[in-house]
Each structure stands twice: as C-alpha cells, then as structure tokens.
Image (tube, rainbow, N blue to C red):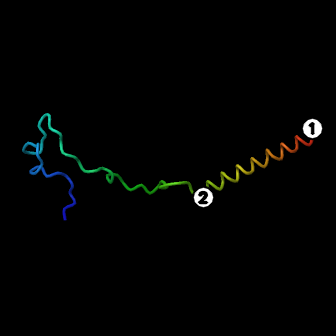
C-alpha cells in the first residue's frame, strides 16, 4: 500500500510536463503538515494538574482566613 498522498503529476489536470503549473492555473493540494514536527511530550494535553490547583486553593483559603480573623479583630476592638 502506498502512503504517498501527493498528487501524481501524470494524472493531475493543469500541470505541464515535469510537474510545473502554468500561469493562471491553481496548483494541486499538498499533503498535511500536521505530523511534520517531533511529537510534543513535554506539555500537558489539557487542564491543570492536581498539585498546582491544590496549592492555589490552600493559599486562597489561608488568605481568606487571615482577612476574616483580621476583620473580626478590628470589629471587636471598635
């Protein structure tokens, strides 16, 4: 089985001998370049990891608790 998806110049209409395109003619479509580069294994494919989300939640909770205690402290001193 041939996996070459390039058009065959002998069977493609509008091509001159040798595979060149005459002026005013639309060239044939090319193969996709989606698989041209190396496979990306460094970056996550989607979403956030559980560790960073947990760290953000803990820091946010500590900040909220601090400001709540500070507000109660100020309210009781007034």
Badge 1 crowding class, 10 Å Cα cut-off, few under 14, some 14 to 19, many 20 or more, is few
Q: Is residue 16 above or below residue 7?
A: above
Q: Whole-Å distance between the Cαs marked 2 and 1?
A: 42 Å
* Direction from residue 7 to residue 51 in the image, left or right: right
Residue mark closest to the camera, 2 vs 1: 1
- The residue shown at (89%, 41%) is 75
* Residue in the picture at 19% in, 62% down: 2
Between 45 and 78, which is closer to the camera in this rendering? 78
Image quadrant for the N terminus? bottom left
Residue at image mark 2: 50
Establish if 21 lies above or below 1: above
**Disc 2 secondary structure class:** helix
Q: Could you tell me residue 19's position as x and y percent?
A: 12, 45
Q: In which quarter of the image is the C terminus?
A: top right
Residue 51 screen position, x and y as percent? 61, 57
Q: For mark 1, what is the residue?
A: 78
Q: In this view, does 28 lie to the left or right of 77?
A: left
Instruction: In the displayed orientation, state which residue is furthest to the top.
Output: 23
Q: Residues within 10 Å of mark 2 (few under 14, many from 20)?
A: few
Q: Nearer the viewer, residue 17 or 78?
A: 78
Q: Position of residue 70 (x, y in %)?
A: 83, 44
Q: Which of 25 and 38 is in front in this view?
A: 25
Give the quadrant of residue 38: bottom left
Which label is found at residue 16?
A: none
Q: Residue at x 17, y 51 (%)?
A: 7
Secondary structure of residue under mark 1: loop
Question: In the image, residue 9 lies at what x, y percent?
Answer: 12, 49
Residue that sits furthest to the right in the current view: 77
**Sequence-wise first label, 2 or 1:** 2
């Amino acid at each position: 089985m041939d996996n070459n998806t390039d058009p065959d110049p002998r069977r493609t209409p509008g091509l001159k001998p040798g595979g060149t395109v005459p002026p005013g003619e639309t060239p044939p479509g090319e193969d996709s370049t989606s698989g041209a580069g190396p496979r990306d294994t460094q970056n996550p494919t989607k979403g956030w990891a559980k560790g960073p989300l947990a760290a953000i939640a803990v820091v946010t909770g500590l900040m909220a608790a601090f400001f709540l205690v500070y507000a109660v402290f100020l309210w009781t001193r007034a």
